[in-house]
Structures are given as structure tokens and as C-alpha cells.
Image (spheres, rainbow, N blue to C red):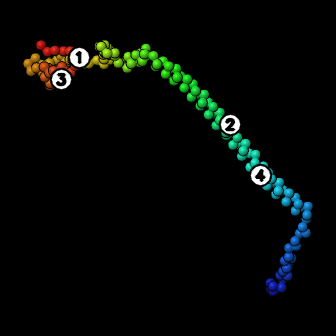
Amino acid sequence: MPDPKARRPARRTAKPKRKRPSDPARRRAIVWGAAASVVFVGLLFAFVYPTRTFIDQRTDTAKARDQLAFLRDANAKLADEAKLLQGDDEIKKRARAYGLVEPGERPFVIIPAPATPTTTTAPPDTKTSANTGTSANTGTSANTAPPAGSSYRSP
């Protein structure tokens, strides 16, 4: 067998990288591009931020004007109510609404009639044992007291 080392081709030596000759036109284009980017970012900071702040301030000013208009309306209503309260008639009217009376008057309170109950009670058990006096169903005495609040009176 032939020698494996003999068949190998000789190694190539790496050539050192050659530096490109500097191209002044390309260098100028890169410098101008970088300068234009810096100027563009500067313009964004100079115009966009103040514009956004201006728009925010306009919104806040509009909200403050709306609130001021609401408060002026409320203030006008309160001023009208204060004028009403300067007279004795309005003060008496409001005092009576609270249940107050003038000296020498007797207060009366009208209590509304109770509402009729919507539930019904079960009829009393009529099947009682005649001899024992107890209910056939429950074993309790038939002569027990009626429920509280009942108008039934035993004889």
C-alpha cells in the first residue's frame, strides 16, 4: 500500500488579508448618514416631546374648564338656596319637614295602618279526643294559649 502521507497535497499557506484602500466617498457617506441620524433624533426630542406635552396640557385645560363650569353652576344653585333660607317662611317649611313645631303647638304623629298579612295560618285541628282533651295528631293539650298577638280570647 502506498504511503498515505505521500498522497496528501501540500498545505496551502493562508494569505494575509489585504486592507482595502480607503474610499473617501464611502467614508463621507457613512459620516453624513451618522450625522443625519443624530440630527433626526435631535429634532424628535426638540419637536415631538414638546408637542406631546402641549397636547396633554390642552386636554388637562379642557377638563379643568369643564370642572370650573360645573362648580360655577353648583355655586349658583347654592347661592339661590341661601337666598331662600334668608326668609322665615322657608325655614319654617324645612323645620316642619323634620317634625319640629313652634312653641305652644302640640305635635301629632299619624301612624299608618298595619299592612294586612299575606300569609295565612293553618286552621286549628278540630279532631280532638273528647275524653282526654288532647289532640289526636300531636298529643298536646287542646286548651293551650293562642299565639302572641292573636285577638282570640278563651272563655
**Of the image marks 2 and 3, the number of the one nearer the N terminus:** 2
Residues at badges 1 and 3 in contact (C-beta under 8 Å)? no
Q: Nearer the viewer, residue 36 or 103?
A: 103
Q: Secondary structure at mark 2?
A: helix
Residues at badges 4 and 3 in contact (C-beta under 8 Å)? no
Q: Quadrant of residue 31?
A: bottom right
**Of the image marks 4 and 3, the number of the one nearer the N terminus:** 4
Residue 22 image point, x, y percent: 90, 67
Mark identifier at residue 123? 1
Q: Does 151 sit above or below residue 67?
A: above
Q: Is residue 63 left or right of residue 93?
A: right
Q: Quadrant of residue 109?
A: top left
Kind of residue indicated by mark 4: Gly
Mark identifier at residue 53? none
**Of the image marks 1 and 2, the number of the one nearer the N terminus:** 2
Give the residue number, with chain letter if any, for mark 2: 58
